[in-house]
Amino acid sequence: MWEKWMRRALELAALAEGRTSPNPLVGALVLDQTGRLVGEGFHSRAGEPHAEVGALAQAGEAARGGTLVVTLEPCCHHGRTPPCSEAVIRAGIARVVVALKDPDPRVAGGGIAQLRQAGVEVIADVLREAAEEQNHAFLHRLKTGRPWGVLKWAMSLDGRTALPNGLSQWISGPPARAWVHRLRAGCDAVVVGGGTVRADDPLLTSRGQRLPEPLRVVLSRSLDLPEKARLWDVDPAPTVVAHGPEAAGRSLVCGPERLPLEECEPKALMQALANRGCNRVLWECGPKLAAIALRQGCIQEVAAVVAPKLMGGMAARTPLGDLGLQRMEDVPTGMLQHPIGIGDDWLMRFRLRACIDFNR
Amino acid sequence: MWEKWMRRALELAALAEGRTSPNPLVGALVLDQTGRLVGEGFHSRAGEPHAEVGALAQAGEAARGGTLVVTLEPCCHHGRTPPCSEAVIRAGIARVVVALKDPDPRVAGGGIAQLRQAGVEVIADVLREAAEEQNHAFLHRLKTGRPWGVLKWAMSLDGRTALPNGLSQWISGPPARAWVHRLRAGCDAVVVGGGTVRADDPLLTSRGQRLPEPLRVVLSRSLDLPEKARLWDVDPAPTVVAHGPEAAGRSLVCGPERLPLEECEPKALMQALANRGCNRVLWECGPKLAAIALRQGCIQEVAAVVAPKLMGGMAARTPLGDLGLQRMEDVPTGMLQHPIGIGDDWLMRFRLRACIDFNR
């Protein structure tokens, strides 16, 4: 019977998609003693009240003896906001229905234990898998210390991302390119290499669909970057240039922030981005950097736009550089979701099987 | 009101899919004077009776004063079987409903004219587009003198058809490979180059789903072919080795038939295959031959199986060799149909826009 209300709580949580990092998405609702809906809330962004607080405030006195349905275990620690478990108890809630235990080590079951100790009935694991799916990026970061990586490319049906002479604008149609802006809006950062800046001079924003815009990141070994680039104008969105110690002494163009890494590798960049609160990072780089990011476990998902075109060319650019694979059994596999038509193109989303080990 | 019956006639025609070449698919049915279905027929293979004849025979005397619904204009010429227009008149049919005028220059409206002259009412163009679609391969051959070409490949999501070291077995899963057997069953011939024989030693049959099996064709400039290959055993299916005049003096392994061409080019091969009665030819060749076939207008359709894998590799084989394109505006486009899931893989069917001119 709680599934129906939990589904509603998940819908509430989804209202803030792409805006809560480093926090997870959370939705909550309150039913009074008779089972009537009396309050709804969701976590809108880090620093703002938690979902339970909004729902309880809306319910007011009607919460007493009622049920709180919440997608994530109420927190029991003082963070930027006071612990929710105490607010729940204080509101006189008799029963809490939870989808997902909070994997944050500061909570990890402590919220549920505190509620039970106070005599509140707790029903856990209701629509747990759906809640895990909704917060897969957040959960991945907590588990691995790195953001969830999405690799995006547009290609012709024959797997080309440029003509042999390097031309690539445009492979996909305007609706698919607009979809990429929406994809960016769901990410906390967008990464390219220096080569993409030089070749395409991209803007890399969500075109205002996410405010603030995702962080634009250039990973550059050499800092050999063009003097002028749309990314250096940080009015539309912030830009950082990440580099390793070998470029520490080199100067940087005006505008972007500098992000020194211990080594100029995707892995180190992803750790630095996790430290800045990124849950989900989009890679829009060329094939060589994409292959390195994949080999270093920085890619969990691929979003490939397939255009109804044949570009050909033995020397033409393709989505992925060398992965060092010698046997078909070692090829990374995963799950291709049902393709979605966008204009004349097809979006294919692919989720890599976890725990791919390139170093076998 | 005739659409419903024409749809049934198209269904009847489809029963012989892949088996009527060089003839088209044709289905027919007879309604008696009161509109009751009294006969059905379809053309099962070249040399066998036409669809109308079967339907009229089944209807017998009930055809008198009735309606014949047929997907293709009744023929008016003596071919391997006597003209159907005469049989229709003789049976006392009062009305003929036709989807498609026969583009065969020996008919081309003559059948309809003959019927009208005999006082039979003729309603034409009912579900014409569906009938054109059903016989697109036959219509293409009549229009161009060449069979409809389908290029098939299996690739990873990143557009690779082999690992950098050349390994490629298997990219797609068993259900997709079984689907390829079905695809072959709908074709009159399957073409590979010498390189594919050397690298993969393929069998290229429909595994008995089409009898006789499609003609297996090796296009070889040099006749530098392996001594042993599964294709040389012509018990399961016939094999021909096509070559140009430069290899005329060279000897050939035992088993396959020799098919000398004026030049060793896909275009010349397709003309020769049209002369042998092929309406639809499947290309299962490597990237270089595929690119030449495409440039020479021998490919109308692509069937790409996309596997949930990432294979990578700058040097890895990709589906299509160089097309000599310099501008994105010149890239061949077309229509990507709704992908179909086959096991873990996705089938993407692509139809090229007609009249692509690579020589602009």
Image: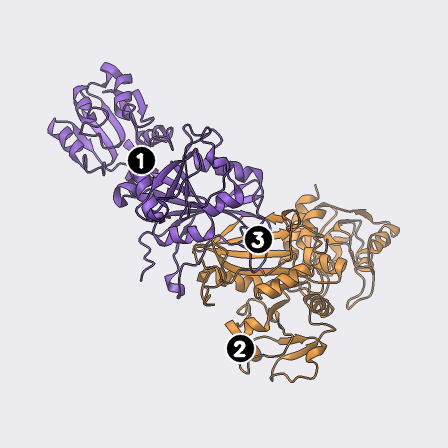
Chain colours: A orange, B purple
Crowd class of label 1 (few under 14; some 14 to 19; many from 20; radius 10 Å)? many
Where, by quadrant of the figure, is residue B15 drawn?
Answer: top left
- B11 sits left or right of B71 in the view: right
Density class for disc 3 (Cα within 10 Å; few <14, some 14-19, many ≥20) is: many
Q: Is residue A333 visible?
A: yes
- Whether residues under marks 1 and 2 lie with C-beta atoms below 8 angstroms apart, the answer is no
Q: Position of residue B118 (x, y in %)?
A: 12, 26
User: What residue sits right under mark 2 in the picture?
Assistant: A230
**What amino acid does circle 3 point to?**
Arg
Taking A162 as reference, is A80 left or right? right
Q: Pinpoint the chain carrying mark 1.
A: B
Q: Is there CB contact under 8 Å for labels 3 and 1?
A: no
Estimate the x, y position of residue A72 in percent, counting from the top left.
74, 54
Q: Chain of mark 3?
A: A
**Residue at the limit of the structure toward the left, as seen here:** B117
Whole-number angstrom distance, CA of label 2 to CA of label 3? 29 Å
Q: Nearer the viewer, mark 3 or mark 1?
A: 1
In the depicted view, which residue is nearer to us: B271 or B24? Answer: B271
Residue at mark 2: chain:
A
Could you confirm whether marks 1 and 2 are on the same chain? no
Q: Which mark is residue B277?
A: 1
Q: CA distance from mark 1 to mark 2?
A: 59 Å
SS state under label 2: helix
Q: Could you tell me if residue A40 is visible in this image?
A: no
In the rendered image, the vertical position of residue A253 relative to residue A176, given as above or below = below
| Residue behind mark 3 | A349
The type of residue carrying mark 2 is: Arg
Callout 3 secondary element? strand
